[in-house]
Image (cartoon, rainbow, N blue to C red):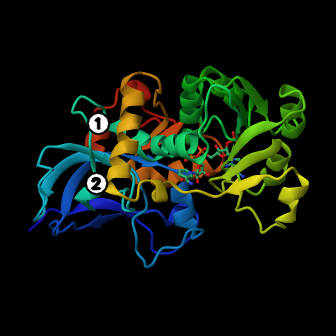
Amino acid sequence: MPRPTHAIRIHAYGGPEVLQWEEVEVGAPGPGEVKIRQHAVGVNYLDVYHRTGLYPQPSFPFTPGSEGAGKVIEVGEGVTDLAVGDHVAYAWPLGGYAEQRLIPADRLVKIPSEFPYETAAMMMLQGMTVRYLLKETFPVTKDTVLLWHAAAGGVGLIACQWAHHIGATIIGTAGTDEKAQLARVHGCTHVINYRTENFVERVKEITGGRGVDVVYDSVGKDTFAGSLDCLRPRGLFVNFGNASGPVPPFDLGVLAKKGSLYVTRPTLFTHIATRAALLEAATDVIDMVQLGRVRINAGKVYRMSEAAEAHRALEARETTSSIVLLADYAARRVPSAHRGSGMI
Ligand code: NDP
């Protein structure tokens, strides 16, 4: 009989309280699958959309979480390139908030054994997102002037460092002066507190009236109209998230009036759909971290069973940087200095 383990499960859409820590049984891996014992899983705003039903799921109960890292403990039939004991990480599919899980082997990436699980768990989804946004959605160069909203968040701080490494001019926005300062030390050239300043006026001022080449907007509803006004003629508006709610339907004619603008709404999963694309993206991210060009810091660390508290803080805009949940056996290794106030 397999020993029961624990996972967060959702039985109905709702607030953070629907994240229930329950005993579950994880069966043996099927053909092409492996079973992993997870040490750390990343918390992403995406998980909030799954929990609330903004991105609906096919059935209940389900386990949220799209990013994690751990050790292979069982290998299914036909899996030849992974073995028990390998350290692995992933960014999809759902099922992350769990001590153990089954996952298709072709969605896993091997990570160097000296690489901390916590780092791997926080960098896969957010790091590969930044990579495609800066390399593929708009090929950012040292001559690019870009605007990045929520620059002090998990994706935001990785983006600031990556774009700074490229040499681009980065205008970041953030909700408090402390967050603005954090974005600045992570590479932002200019930072705007968009709760106290008019970000459109400030962008015009900073760019001498020209506007930016590209706006990366994951805030959505609240920043959409202003973001279009920050673009130079024929600039690109990239909406890649909905932290304040989805962008409502709009008249395409607006794009003509504001200067023949381009708009796109990309998602990571299209960019890592094939095994080759996943490996290329993950390798780039691992390299950036190993070379020290991007540092992945946990703004908050929680036990996996405390996922509800992590969601509450994320939605209340109390967090900066990435958030990680640790399995109990991994949490016990965290220094006592980090215990309390969301740091275990
Ligand atoms: P963040 O750490 O960036 O948290 C969200 C931030 O958004 C908040 O901290 C807050 O920063 C800002 N915000 C502005 N308005 C609101 C609001 N009304 N409610 C809550 N937050 C608000 O989250 P992640 O790093 O996990 O994700 C960032 C975004 O990237 C998300 O929208 C996510 O969906 C998106 N994403 C998209 C992907 C894709 O491929 N399309 C893949 C991965 C992530 P502040 O206080 O500074 O305003």
Query: Looking at the image, which residue is at 62% across and 43% down?
Result: 138
Q: Residue at x 71, y 55 (%)?
A: 263
Number of the label disc, if any, that sits on residue 99: 2
Q: Quadrant of the C terminus?
A: top left
- Viewer-proximal residue among 136 and 3: 136
Task: Tell whether 158 sits left or right of 71.
Answer: right
Q: Is residue 277 left or right of residue 53?
A: left
In x, y percent, where is residue 106? 26, 57
Secondary element at image label 1: loop
Regarding residue 326, the answer to whether it shows in the image is: no
Q: Residue at x 18, y 69 (%)?
A: 27
The three-letter amino acid code for the residue at tag 2 is Glu
User: Type of residue at label 1?
Assistant: Arg
> In x, y percent, where is residue 267?
54, 57
Determine whether 119 is above or below 15 in the image. above
Q: How many marks?
A: 2
Residue bearing the label numbered 1: 332
Pick the front one: 258 or 55: 258
Can residue 123 be seen in this snapshot? yes
Are circles 2 and 1 on residues that touch, CB within 8 Å?
A: no
Q: Earlier in the sequence, mark 2 or mark 1?
A: 2
What is the distance, in whole Å, between disc 2 and disc 1 at their CAs? 14 Å
| Badge 2 density bin: few <14, some 14–19, many ≥20, Cα 10 Å | many
Question: Residue 20: x and y, percent?
Answer: 42, 64
Q: Pick whichever, 14 or 216, lies toward us.
A: 216
**160 displayed left or right of 97:** right
Q: Position of residue 234 (x, y in %)?
A: 79, 47
Q: What is the quadrant of the N terminus in the image? A: bottom left
